[in-house]
């Protein structure tokens, strides 16, 4: 479904991002995964090459809020492949800190990775996507619709992701660039494994489809939205949550 396309996936070293990378590779895209450290991106590429040595995959670890680093990285990727077609802004961190304990430094950390990096990567990729008539995809969350009982800046950051998605979809439509988001529910990754059992188990029981989501459930939605099958879809926040409404 993505033959000939070049995709960048931030937060591609594990969890949902890793599954998106693998799904795109299985559909014949060339993929550049981003992570936060050399060791983790190297490990992810090694793992993928073990699965299929013919995967066309490489990695970088730019600071996602550093304009100069990102510019250089996108230029390098464009020089290597000649075009960039898909950006997936997936890297994100969560929080369950209560409001009284929520520090300004945690606020900055969440807003930098979950909002500023989405803004920065999107802004800097647009010149390339104008050429390729490409696609920007963002990882939102079900909490972007209903909020969350603690960790206020996490849901707030995903409300912002939805705002960026809907606004850029309108701003960039005339350039032929589509912008969509996927809003996962409870997905079995390290992010969810890190949460207290008392919080997660009751939540899973309320999911109408009767199970926790898998990273691949989410990756399938990204594949669809990245592909030409979604050529008339832009500005959408696609829920992939088994009808969970937290
Ligand atoms: P994860 O912790 O398994 O993976 C997070 C990814 O983000 C990793 O690849 C990591 O390298 C990257 N990352 C973390 N900090 C970074 C930094 N400072 N700079 C660059 N990259 C960094 O998490 P996940 O569950 O796969 O989450 C991926 C996305 O999905 C996030 O945006 C998250 O908010 C969203 N999400 C997850 C769930 C869930 O239930 N797991 C639900 C809704 C939304």
Image: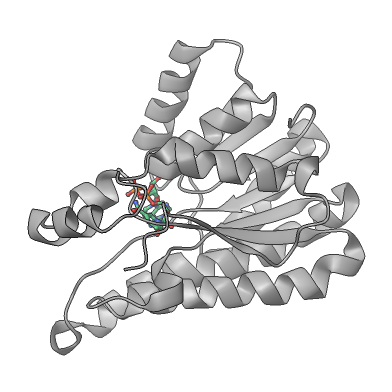
Res 60 visible: no
Name which residue lies at 66% across and 63% down: 122
On screen, residue 78 above or below 72:
above
Query: Whole-percent x and y of residue 215?
Result: 41, 40
- 188 or 93: nearer the eye? 188
Query: Whole-percent x and y of residue 132?
Result: 86, 47
Res 190 visible: yes
- 23 or 68: nearer the eye? 23
Name which residue lies at 67% across and 73% down: 166
Left or right relative to 95: residue 221? right
Q: How is the image coloured?
A: one colour
In the picture, which quadrant includes the C terminus?
Answer: bottom left
In the picture, which quadrant includes the N terminus?
Answer: top right
Name which residue lies at 45% across and 74% down: 145
The image quarter containing residue 57 is top right
How many marks the image carries: the answer is 0
- 79 or 155: nearer the eye? 155
On screen, residue 219 above or below 172:
above
Left or right relative to 92: residue 86? right
On screen, residue 214 above or below 151:
above
Name which residue lies at 39% across and 56% down: 185
Query: Whole-percent x and y of residue 123?
Result: 70, 67
Left or right relative to 107: residue 201? left
Query: Whole-percent x and y of residue 210?
Result: 30, 46
Which residue appears farthest toward the left when viewing the image? Answer: 198
The image quarter containing residue 95 is bottom left
Left or right relative to 217: residue 102? left
């Amino acid at each position: 479904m993505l033959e000939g396309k070049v995709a960048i996936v931030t937060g591609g070293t594990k969890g949902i991002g890793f599954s998106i990378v693998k799904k795109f590779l299985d559909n014949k895209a060339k993929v550049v995964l981003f992570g936060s450290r050399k060791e983790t991106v190297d490990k992810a590429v090694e793992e993928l090459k073990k699965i299929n040595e013919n995967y066309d995959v490489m990695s970088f670890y730019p600071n996602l809020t550093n304009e100069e680093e990102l510019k250089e990285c996108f230029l390098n990727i464009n020089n290597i492949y000649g075009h960039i077609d898909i950006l997936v802004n997936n890297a994100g961190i969560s929080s369950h800190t209560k409001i009284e304990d929520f520090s300004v430094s945690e606020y900055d950390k969440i807003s930098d990775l979950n909002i500023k990096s989405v803004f920065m990567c999107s802004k800097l990729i647009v010149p390339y996507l104008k050429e390729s008539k490409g696609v920007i995809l963002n990882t939102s969350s079900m909490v972007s619709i209903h909020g969350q009982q603690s960790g206020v800046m996490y849901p707030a950051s995903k409300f912002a992701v939805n705002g960026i998605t809907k606004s850029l979809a309108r701003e960039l439509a005339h350039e032929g660039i589509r912008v969509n988001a996927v809003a996962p529910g409870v997905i079995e990754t390290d992010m969810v494994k890190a949460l207290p059992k008392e919080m997660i188990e009751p939540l899973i029981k309320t999911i109408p489809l009767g199970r926790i989501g898998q990273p691949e459930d989410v990756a399938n939605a990204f594949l669809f939205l990245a592909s030409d099958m979604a050529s008339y879809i832009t500005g959408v926040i696609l829920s992939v949550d088994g009808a969970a409404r937290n």
